[in-house]
């Protein structure tokens, strides 16, 4: 969202890039919204210099501060240009039971007196959008140790190692993501409040509601303009929290599915009408539950009856937590499992779209984890 003199954002995977020359150092001037110590959740970021992971920072101690100057690099040759990319690697408000404004704003950059901005490289033409929950957001994927008792925190959520991020990197695509742990299409899990992913998808800033409390809709100024960015592919993986939130540990509830089916169908057809026939829709199921796979197939059939030109298909991800692709961290995909899911998704999307891979899967979870825990 463009605010006066700044840019506000809260979704995972958002990147801010700039190319600098004539300066030996650069800092970013930023703030984070939120003054309630019980609701404030820190956001975590990776910093890349010329495409190499340089450092990380977080907003744990930013509450109440007017502005924070974040060092990005120092001691560089002033005659050389350097591209700096700040990547948000946590969801809007980590695993928040109640949603409150938790967005960050970047106000600008500081540097030596000779600082100049240079043109950035062209961004990719391919566009992929992901709508999902903790599976897509990278919840707990960098936990150490990674097992059934892993303690999941914002510090061990690494969106850049998630299957969604890796898929975009390997296919050389822009990546637009709205993913939030515990939230579903028609029902949330794990004591989360009433705001659903089917509502959040409509927002520019996910953590900002129309009233500042829940349940609430989205104010007109915070509605996303679906004409501003039309994806070639929209991938949806939602349903795990609907199942888990209605009947305990991932067991389906008979009364859930009519409501789930109707809400999911409305979401899909609304997206199809917003984006048009050029967008390919991929509906994923798994890997934490397969209980909603039949519902996904029903939604696909109904949507195609209503919109005959709709291009929609099923991505089966149910097998990836069988232990053969890597460990699960508190029942969620680890970075190793994320990589396997991405490898399969790259092949699947590449075949559908006739896209070649432009890069290998660019993951280094060990180095990410070391930096995150410094």
Image (cartoon, helix red, strand yellow):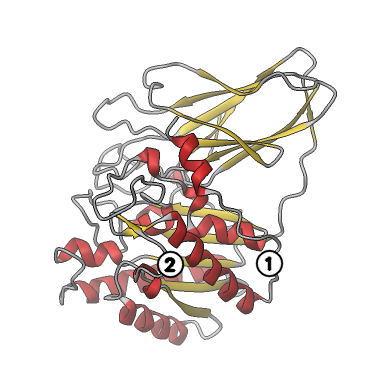
The residue shown at (53%, 39%) is 1
Q: Residues within 10 Å of mark 2 (few under 14, many from 20)?
A: some
Residue farthest to the top? 113
Secondary element type, mark 2:
loop
Q: Is residue 253 left or right of residue 178?
A: left
Q: Which residue is mark 1?
A: 357
Residue 210: x, y in percent?
34, 42
Q: Position of residue 4 (x, y in %)?
A: 56, 27
Of pointers 2 and 1, the one earlier in the residue sequence: 2
* Residue 56 position (above or below residue 93): above
Q: Name the residue: 62% across, 67% down.
A: 232
Residue of label 2: 325
Q: Is 131 placed above or below 320 here?
A: above
Q: Nearer the viewer, residue 33 or 144?
A: 144
Pointers 2 and 1 in contact (CB under 8 A)? no
User: Exactly how many numbered labels are in the figure?
Assistant: 2
Where residue 247 sits in the image (x, y, percent)? Answer: 14, 66
Residue 188 occupies quadrant: bottom left
């Amino acid at each position: 969202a463009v605010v006066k003199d700044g840019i506000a954002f809260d979704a995972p995977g958002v990147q801010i890039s700039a190319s600098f020359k004539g300066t030996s150092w650069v800092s970013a001037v930023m703030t984070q919204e939120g003054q309630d110590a019980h609701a404030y959740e820190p956001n975590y970021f990776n910093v890349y210099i010329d495409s190499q992971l340089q450092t990380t920072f977080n907003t744990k101690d930013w509450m109440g501060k007017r502005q924070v100057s974040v060092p990005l690099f120092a001691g560089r040759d002033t005659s050389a240009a350097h591209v700096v990319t700040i990547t948000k690697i946590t969801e809007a408000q980590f695993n928040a039971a109640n949603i409150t404004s938790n967005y960050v704003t970047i106000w600008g950059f500081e540097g030596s007196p000779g600082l100049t901005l240079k043109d950035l490289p062209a961004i990719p033409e391919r566009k992929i959008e992901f709508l999902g929950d903790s599976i897509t957001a990278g919840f707990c994927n960098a936990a150490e140790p990674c097992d059934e008792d892993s303690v999941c925190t914002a510090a061990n959520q690494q969106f850049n190692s998630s299957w969604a991020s890796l898929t975009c990197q390997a296919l050389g695509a822009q990546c637009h993501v709205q993913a939030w742990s515990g939230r579903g299409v028609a029902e949330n899990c794990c004591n989360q409040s009433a705001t659903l992913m089917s509502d959040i998808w409509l927002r520019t800033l996910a953590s900002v509601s129309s009233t500042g409390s829940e349940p609430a809709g989205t104010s007109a100024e915070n509605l996303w303009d679906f004409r501003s960015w039309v994806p070639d592919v929209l991938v949806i993986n939602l349903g795990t929290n609907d199942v888990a939130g209605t009947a305990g540990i991932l067991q389906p509830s008979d009364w859930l599915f009519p409501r789930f089916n109707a809400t999911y169908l409305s979401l899909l057809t609304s997206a199809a009408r917003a984006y048009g026939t050029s967008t390919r829709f991929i509906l994923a199921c798994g890997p934490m539950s397969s209980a909603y796979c039949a519902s996904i197939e029903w939604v696909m059939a109904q949507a195609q009856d209503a919109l005959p030109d709709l291009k929609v298909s099923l991505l089966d991800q149910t097998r990836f937590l069988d232990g053969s692709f890597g460990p699960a961290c508190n029942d969620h995909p680890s970075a190793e499992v994320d990589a396997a899911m991405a490898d399969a998704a790259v092949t699947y999307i590449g075949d559908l779209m006739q896209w070649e891979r432009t890069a290998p899967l660019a993951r280094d979870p060990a180095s990410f984890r070391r930096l995150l825990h410094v």
